[in-house]
Image (cartoon, rainbow, N blue to C red):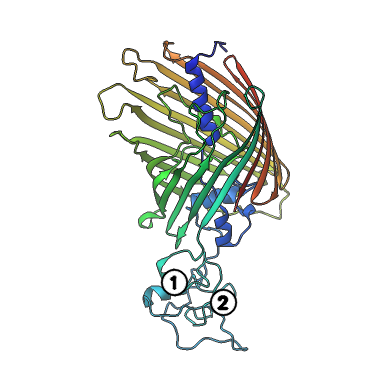
Amino acid sequence: MKNTSLNSLTVIVLGALATALFFAHSAFAIPAFTRAHKVECTTCHTIFPELNEYGEAFLKNSYVYVGKKKAGKDKEAAPATAPAAKPAATANGSAKAKVIRGDGDADKLSKLKSGAMITDGDTADTPAAAPAPVASSGDSSSGEGKSEGLLLAAIPEQLPISFTGALNVIYDNKAVNEFDFSTRSFKLHAGGNFRDTVGFFATYVAYSEQPPVGTYNSSIISSNNKTDINEFYITWRHLLDTPLNLKIGRMQPKLGLWKTNNKLTVTNNYLPYTYTVGKESLFRVEQTQDALELNAVLGKRFFVAGGVVNRKGQNTKEGYGHISYKFGGADYLANEPDIDLSKDETILDFLTLSVGAYGYYGKNGTANSNDPKNSYYRLGLDTELLYKAFRLRVLGGIGSDDNVAPSIITQKTRVTSRSGTAEVEYALKMNLLASTRFEYLQQEATPDKQNFTNLYARRYVAALGYAPLENLKLIAEYKYEIANSAINRLGTMGLTFGF
């Protein structure tokens, strides 16, 4: 490994990289989903916001609760007729099924009632259209207790809105202010689906604080108030009765196996997803972009995605693709594997392996001009191994930029990037996780011109996460970083919560 002095350009690269690491935003399962489906946070999370197998299935199925029983779909004998004149009563005179009052669209209403409006206690012999007073409360996800207007309009009865916040205390002995007490971010999220057909998600960053200037983990431009819509997209599920899902809007394109916040640590995302190249080529794998994506779950365990990105000010579009497969464990539709109780347990009964690969191709430079452009690509391979309380994640990526500084017209410098991450996580208790991670990044120019300085960075991160409540996480981290001739040691105490 080469050891060269940090010049100003290298500091810019490191600062841009650190900004991405500190303030990448994400969409993850939010507390509004627990209110809508009346389940615990641990249904989808190990420790919030890290997803478990069911949380991954929930995400891949566009926030549709794939585990709920579709009452009525398995009840072929249930008639889809207009409301009867009198309630079907039991021996004590109480009605067993719920009904919606009002005229509305009788045909559509009867179809909805034959499924969504049947109570859990109903049997196939219970008339689906038996009228009874509508309850004022109930499971809005299944349609129980809704008024006719809300059910016909497919509007969620409960507002699907949540808030998340992060508070950090960072110690850096190289900073002017060694202890940095920071309110890092406060975000508003909205997500859900309309009658299991169209899923939606949005994140609005109400406040996001940048770290102090002067260290490897700093922003080039210090800003304490950053307000923006980070993600806002919809998904049309099972497009034209096919397995395809059409996703459009501002989103994090599906590349890696995990979204930004699907991890235990609070300050750093995985390096292969977050690094940038040079001062002008600021693309990173995890960034949110305006895109159109098609994705699908095939054969329950194979997931594919591909799309195009519309970069502002450019006529050319960028493209990407992702494939992943899961061996063992629950599949991508949240179906648990069959267990043969007549046989002795083996290691394969508890082993789950997920493998994913992705590619991205793009071009940046001065918008819509004849000036030189930078064509780049990123390729990556991710794996995750789960065995009982043990989790191993391994990521690797390569990238190439053919003109890392297109504004310097007289020179053209190609930069090759190599990055990797290995993380081990172990659940000491259900609400206590420990992890350790090693990461590296290597960026080399060919030829080595003056407009780029080769970069060599290494990072070691240890973390301990504790969730005293399901929607609250306390985290302690220690980070040791080596970048060319610079060494940084940072400690972080963080609190993340949602409601």
Residue 247: give x, y in percent of width and height.
40, 48
Residue 163: give x, y in percent of width and height.
55, 51
Q: Please say if 368 is above or below 432.
A: above
Residue at 53% x, 47% y is 187
Circle 1 residue: 112
For the residues labelled 1 and 2, the Cα–Cα distance comes to: 17 Å
Foreground pick, 330 / 447: 447
- Report which quarter residue 197 is drawn in: bottom left
Does residue 26 appear in the picture of this structure? no
Residue 152: give x, y in percent of width and height.
41, 70
* Of the two numbered discs 1 and 2 in the rendering, the one whose residue sits closer to the viewer: 1
Tag 1's secondary structure? helix
- Report which quarter residue 282 is drawn in: top left
Residue at 64% x, 41% y is 386
Tag 2's secondary structure? loop
- Classify 10 Å Cα crowding around label 2: few (below 14), some (14-19), many (20 and above): some
Does residue 474 appear in the picture of this structure? yes
Q: Which mark is residue 123?
A: 2
The kind of residue tagged 2 is Thr
- Classify 10 Å Cα crowding around label 1: few (below 14), some (14-19), many (20 and above): many
The kind of residue tagged 1 is Leu
